[in-house]
Amino acid sequence: MTVKELKFNEAGLLPAIVQDAISREVLMMAWMNEESLQLTIQSGETWFWSRSRQELWHKGGTSGNTQKVKTLYYDCDGDTLLILVTPAGPACHTGEQSCFYRDIPLANQ
Protein backbone atom coordinates (compact mmCIF):
# COMPACT_ATOMS: atom_id res chain seq x y z
CA MET A 1 0.00 0.00 0.00
CA THR A 2 1.22 3.50 -0.73
CA VAL A 3 0.60 6.59 1.38
CA LYS A 4 -1.92 7.80 -1.23
CA GLU A 5 -3.96 4.61 -0.72
CA LEU A 6 -4.36 5.12 3.05
CA LYS A 7 -7.78 6.29 4.23
CA PHE A 8 -7.33 9.69 5.83
CA ASN A 9 -10.43 11.05 7.60
CA GLU A 10 -12.45 14.04 6.40
CA ALA A 11 -9.89 16.38 8.03
CA GLY A 12 -7.06 14.65 6.15
CA LEU A 13 -5.75 12.88 9.26
CA LEU A 14 -4.93 9.36 10.41
CA PRO A 15 -4.64 8.25 14.05
CA ALA A 16 -1.12 7.01 14.79
CA ILE A 17 -0.49 4.77 17.79
CA VAL A 18 3.14 4.88 18.93
CA GLN A 19 4.53 1.83 20.71
CA ASP A 20 7.95 1.06 22.18
CA ALA A 21 9.57 -1.43 19.79
CA ILE A 22 11.18 -3.44 22.63
CA SER A 23 8.78 -3.31 25.58
CA ARG A 24 5.65 -2.99 23.39
CA GLU A 25 4.30 -0.36 25.82
CA VAL A 26 1.87 2.01 24.11
CA LEU A 27 3.52 5.41 24.42
CA MET A 28 1.09 7.81 22.80
CA MET A 29 -1.51 8.45 20.14
CA ALA A 30 -1.25 11.41 17.80
CA TRP A 31 -2.56 12.48 14.41
CA MET A 32 -0.71 12.37 11.10
CA ASN A 33 -1.52 14.05 7.84
CA GLU A 34 0.05 13.05 4.55
CA GLU A 35 2.94 15.50 4.98
CA SER A 36 3.83 14.37 8.52
CA LEU A 37 3.70 10.75 7.39
CA GLN A 38 6.04 11.50 4.48
CA LEU A 39 8.41 13.34 6.83
CA THR A 40 8.35 10.36 9.20
CA ILE A 41 9.16 7.96 6.35
CA GLN A 42 11.95 10.19 5.02
CA SER A 43 13.57 11.18 8.34
CA GLY A 44 13.11 7.96 10.33
CA GLU A 45 11.73 9.96 13.27
CA THR A 46 8.11 10.66 14.15
CA TRP A 47 6.34 13.74 12.86
CA PHE A 48 2.70 14.56 13.61
CA TRP A 49 0.02 17.13 12.87
CA SER A 50 -1.00 19.28 15.83
CA ARG A 51 -4.75 19.87 15.62
CA SER A 52 -4.63 22.58 18.30
CA ARG A 53 -1.75 24.54 16.72
CA GLN A 54 -2.59 23.60 13.11
CA GLU A 55 1.04 22.85 12.32
CA LEU A 56 3.53 20.05 11.82
CA TRP A 57 5.18 18.77 14.96
CA HIS A 58 8.47 16.86 15.14
CA LYS A 59 8.32 14.72 18.27
CA GLY A 60 11.26 15.73 20.43
CA GLY A 61 12.06 18.78 18.30
CA THR A 62 12.15 21.01 21.37
CA SER A 63 12.42 18.49 24.23
CA GLY A 64 15.00 16.18 22.68
CA ASN A 65 12.68 13.21 23.36
CA THR A 66 12.73 11.98 19.79
CA GLN A 67 11.36 8.67 18.55
CA LYS A 68 13.42 6.62 16.08
CA VAL A 69 11.05 4.65 13.86
CA LYS A 70 11.76 0.93 13.66
CA THR A 71 8.60 -0.25 11.87
CA LEU A 72 5.56 1.49 10.43
CA TYR A 73 2.37 -0.57 10.09
CA TYR A 74 -1.12 0.21 8.86
CA ASP A 75 -4.25 -1.68 9.87
CA CYS A 76 -6.50 -3.91 7.74
CA ASP A 77 -8.76 -0.97 6.81
CA GLY A 78 -5.86 1.35 5.99
CA ASP A 79 -7.18 4.01 8.36
CA THR A 80 -4.91 3.69 11.42
CA LEU A 81 -1.14 3.54 11.84
CA LEU A 82 0.96 1.67 14.37
CA ILE A 83 4.50 2.98 14.74
CA LEU A 84 7.12 0.98 16.63
CA VAL A 85 9.87 3.25 17.91
CA THR A 86 12.99 3.47 20.01
CA PRO A 87 12.29 6.47 22.25
CA ALA A 88 15.04 8.85 23.38
CA GLY A 89 13.12 9.85 26.49
CA PRO A 90 9.56 10.11 27.78
CA ALA A 91 6.74 10.25 25.25
CA CYS A 92 4.39 12.35 27.37
CA HIS A 93 4.71 16.11 27.77
CA THR A 94 4.15 15.57 31.53
CA GLY A 95 7.44 13.67 31.76
CA GLU A 96 5.75 10.26 32.05
CA GLN A 97 7.18 7.48 29.89
CA SER A 98 3.75 6.90 28.31
CA CYS A 99 0.78 9.21 27.86
CA PHE A 100 -1.33 6.32 29.18
CA TYR A 101 -0.39 6.40 32.85
CA ARG A 102 -3.84 7.00 34.41
CA ASP A 103 -6.67 4.53 34.70
CA ILE A 104 -10.42 4.71 35.16
CA PRO A 105 -11.61 2.34 37.90
CA LEU A 106 -14.20 -0.20 36.80
CA ALA A 107 -17.39 -0.53 38.84
CA ASN A 108 -17.08 -4.30 39.18
CA GLN A 109 -13.54 -4.31 40.60
Image (cartoon, grey):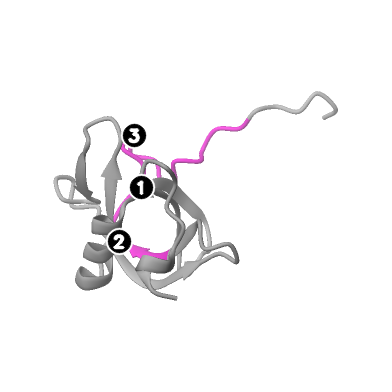
Few, some or many C-alpha atoms within 10 Å of disc 2 (few <14, some 14-19, many ≥20)?
many
> Which of pointers 2 and 3 lies earlier in the amino acid sequence?
2
| Of residues 64 and 75, the one drawn nearer to the viewer in this rendering | 75
Circle 2 residue: 37
Q: Distance between the residues labelled 1 and 3?
A: 28 Å
Q: Which of marks 1 and 2 is in front?
A: 1
Q: How far apart are marks 1 and 2 (CA)?
A: 12 Å
The quarter of the rendered structure image containing the N terminus is bottom left
Q: Residue furthest top?
A: 107
Left or right for 61, reference 65: left
| SS majority, magenta | loop
Circle 3 residue: 94
| Of residues 88 and 40, the one drawn nearer to the viewer in this rendering | 40
Determine whether 59 is above or below 104 in the image. below
> Which of pointers 1 and 2 lies earlier in the amino acid sequence?
1
Residue 3 horizontal/vertical position (percent):
36, 68
Q: What stretch is highlighted in magenta?
A: 84-103
Residue ID at (31%, 52%):
33
Callout 2: SS: helix
The quarter of the rendered structure image containing the C terminus is top right
Residue ID at (31%, 37%):
93
Circle 1 residue: 12
Q: Distance between the residues labelled 2 and 3?
A: 25 Å
Left or right for 47, reference 14: left
